[in-house]
Image (spheres, rainbow, N blue to C red):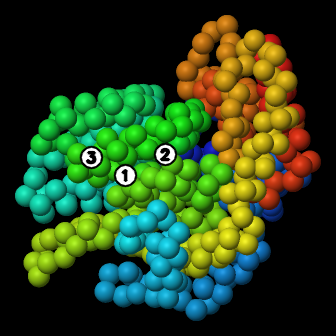
Amino acid sequence: MSDLIQRDGKVCWHPFTQHGLESEPLAVVGAKGAQLELEDGRKLVDGISSWWATLHGHGEETILKAINEQYGRLDHVLFAGATHEPAVRLAERLCALAPQGLNRVFFSDDGSTAVEVALKMVVQRWVLRDQPLRRTFVAFEGAYHGDTFGAMAVGDPDPFFEAFRPLLFDVRRVGLDAQKVGAALDDLGERAAGVIVEPRLMGAAGMKIQPTGFLKSLEEAVHSRDLPLIADEVFTGFGRTGRLFACDSEDVTPDLLCLAKGLTGGMFPLSATLAREEFFEDFLSSDRSRAFFHGHTFTAHPVGCAAALASLDLIADHDTPRLFERIGKRLFRSLADLNQNPRVHNLRQLGGMVAFELSSDQPEGYLAARSQCLRKVAQEHGVLLRPLGDTLYALPPACTNEQELDQIASALHAMVKTND
Ligand SMILES: Cc1ncc(COP(=O)(O)O)c(C=O)c1O
């Protein structure tokens, strides 16, 4: 065991990790493109874009340059009562790119806080509109929106959040059916606050692709009742599904849009909640108590904003959504023969994501021990992958080359074989 891993074992507490069971963490000393470099000299292809964040590739030069230049100019300043060029320019660019009508940008730090901001905007806005009872959201079975309390409440408590359930506010949870959403909203009546959805692709639920048309019918069900729709594109944003935003694929305009992960190309923690102007206007007042009461120390961090601007340039120059589509299709072709294996189910692709379910004699859930064993097999094949329960998937960065894609496909084949 290396010195680094030993020291880590004494002082670090890792996310979503059962330290009593899991093996040593990977000691990563560097990263470039699609590759992670380990302390022992091994290299691993980052098949999951380091938790779906790394967009173009690790160490992307133009983003690095933008980060370094911005650090030299303005490292940090509070965003209450102050502003700066990178934040304003980024807000302008995001509004121009996002579905029409999203004209205001509220910055925060990560996906969970972007969701938290959206939920709080909806709740406070109903209070400001003298409808304080409107505080029950409709959310989806299997949804994941992050780990802060509001985000946990709208997420499905199974299997992660059971311990916190008594502290989570009430949510009406439904399956992926717009009619059921409409019925739930009608049943809630004057208690209905709005609806939150991960459009097109539900990542943590097991890379679940929604049926085509679902999103559009959801938008109709929500908007016909004059309620707000929150689109959580923390995972799906910036080309992952083959479109810049997943909402674009069905021409859907949410009232609030949550962005994080790939916003900075995955190279700096920053998130944004985009809102319709009407939301902003409802908070406008000569009364201070009607201000939106939310903010983080590093809101609109100048370096994060500079990284995001450089990433948006790259997306435009390289047509990143198209690159992801190509990567996904190529992986899908390389895995097509798995369809012959009776244990492999529902091989699918959307944008740069491919996934399938792998059954075993003992059906196991998300917390299955098998997942750790499968991760090891992938690493032996030079690839970092983390199955989501029975779901095996890959989602590499846009720079991943053909050889690296073949390596990912071989690792997935090997994982299936181990299971036989
Ligand atoms: C759809 C979605 N929303 C929110 C989050 C939370 O983001 P973060 O981990 O940056 O807080 C995630 C994280 O995976 C996500 O997939």
**Residue identified by numbered label 1:** 230
Query: What is the spatial separation of the Cα atoms under label 2 and label 3, in whole angstroms?
Result: 19 Å
Q: Indicate the position of residue 32 as horizontal and vertical percent values.
A: 81, 62
Q: Are marks 2 and 3 in contact (CB under 8 Å)?
A: no
Q: Nearer the viewer, mark 2 or mark 3?
A: 3
Q: Is residue 364 visible?
A: yes
Element assignment for label 2: loop
Q: Residue at x 66, y 51 (%)?
A: 242
320 or 387: nearer the eye?
320
Q: Residue at x 60, y 12 (%)?
A: 363
Q: Is residue 161 visible?
A: no
Assess disc 1: are there few (<14), some (14-19) or many (≥20) residues with their C-alpha within 10 Å of its C-alpha: many
Label disc, if present, on residue 224 of the rendered structure: 3
The amino acid sitting under disc 1 is Ile
**Up-down: is 101 above or below 198?**
below
The amino acid sitting under disc 2 is Pro
Horizontal arrangement in the rendering, residue 124 relative to residue 204 (left or right): left
Q: Dividing the image into 4 quarters, which one contains the C terminus?
A: top right
Element assignment for label 3: loop
Q: Indicate the position of residue 314 as horizontal and vertical percent values.
A: 70, 71
Looking at marks 2 and 3 on the same chain, the residue that comes earlier in the sequence is marked by 2
Horizontal arrangement in the rendering, residue 192 relative to residue 91 (left or right): left
Q: Nearer the viewer, mark 1 or mark 3?
A: 3
Q: Dividing the image into 4 quarters, which one contains the N terminus?
A: top right
Label disc, if present, on residue 199 of the rendered structure: 2
